[in-house]
Image: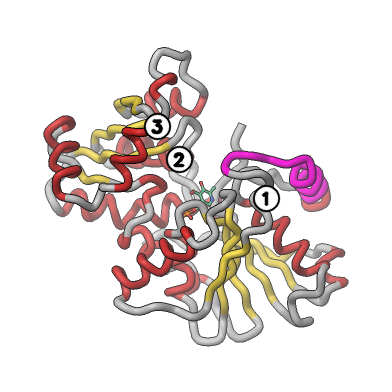
Amino acid sequence: MPPPSPLVTLTDPALSRAGVELRLKRDDLLDPRVPGNKYRKLLPNLRAAVAAGHTRLLTFGGAYSNHIRAVAAAAADHGLESVGLIRGDELADAPRNWSLAAAEADGMRLSFLDRRTYRATLATLAAPETRGRLRRAWGPCHILPEGGSNVLAARGAAGLPAELPGLGPRDIVCCAVGTGGTLAGIAAGLPPGARALGVAALKGASGYLESEVTRLHEDGWRRTFPNWRIHHTHHAGGYARVSPGLAAFTAEFEARHGLAVERHYVAKALHCVHDLAAAGTFPRGTRVTVVVTGPATP
Ligand SMILES: Cc1ncc(COP(=O)(O)O)c(C=O)c1O
């Protein structure tokens, strides 16, 4: 079990006016090398990999993937090897960006796939043929999907609500959604009455993300949960995009509260909560806990 991350209450005028209490669950402080939701999602996978006798992790991600860096760091810290299959073969000969350079510095072997092969491999990742092909190419390994969202990861995230004592009908626990594993876990771990609110960081993912969360619940808990929903209104232009509106909101929020906010996920969740509160969507007395799923990056 990870140690509990800090929980802080913020005094925010816009939310106070709406009668909403805002708290931050500072998962970004969980571990300096494997921060945020990565810590909760990767730990059960590392244990499973070691228990199965694996010495290598293999996973997938984009050029600036937080997940890729976290897997490289977690593997290195646990004495495991790691392989990262990266979207975009045009990156193979380009100078490494800071994120891929960090993964390589932790010993991750990188291989660059053209987008079609990347998509096709992920689409068939559950198939024994695909896994067999990857293991023939890279040796025996524990395979993690893009973003690391498998049942083990969701179960890891499901431990978060237990660190929020007293959750009940006035509570909403909010997180950004990339692949759905964190939200699936949080929803599954909530006590009766409390609800989970996901904010999609991707554009055009309505339906897809909901089906991913439902699939994780069915695979991991053999049931569905009625206590969550995803807002698709605050992706700010899409994955890894930051709109001028989001940039302005985040700069103001950072100045007001004296903390740096991760732009591609956490800021979108905070922006959405602010807009929903300003629109009077939450009944007065609602307590919203936003999970800070990662630290600000360069
Ligand atoms: C900082 C941060 N927050 C949130 C998420 C979304 O988590 P999930 O992929 O479990 O939906 C990610 C990764 O995808 C992330 O890197």
What residue would you read off at disc 2?
33
What residue would you read off at disc 1?
267
Which secondary structure dominates the residues rendered in magenta? helix
Quadrant for residue 106, please give it.
Answer: top left
First of labels 1, 3 by sequence position = 3
In-image side of 50 versus 213 (left or right): left
Q: Quadrant of the C terminus?
A: top right
| Residue type highlighted by circle 3 | Arg
Q: Position of residue 141 (x, y in %)?
A: 18, 41
Q: Quadrant of the N terminus?
A: bottom left
Secondary structure of the residue carrying tag 1 is: helix
Q: Which residue lies at the image location 49% right of the left edge and 42% below the top edge?
A: 32
Q: How is the image coloured?
A: secondary structure
First of labels 2, 1 by sequence position = 2
Q: CA distance from mark 2 to mark 3?
A: 28 Å
Q: CA distance from mark 1 to mark 3?
A: 28 Å
Please, is residue 111 above or below residue 12 in the view? above
Q: CA distance from mark 2 to mark 1?
A: 21 Å
Q: Position of residue 88 (x, y in %)?
A: 42, 27
Q: Nearer the viewer, mark 2 or mark 3?
A: 3
What residue would you read off at disc 3?
115
Q: Which residue lies at the image location 38% right of the left edge and 31% below the top edge?
A: 86
Q: Is disc 1 in contact with disc 3, using a CB cutoff of under 8 Å?
A: no
- In the image, is residue 250 part of the stretch drawn in magenta? yes
Question: Which segment did they paint magenta?
Answer: 239-253
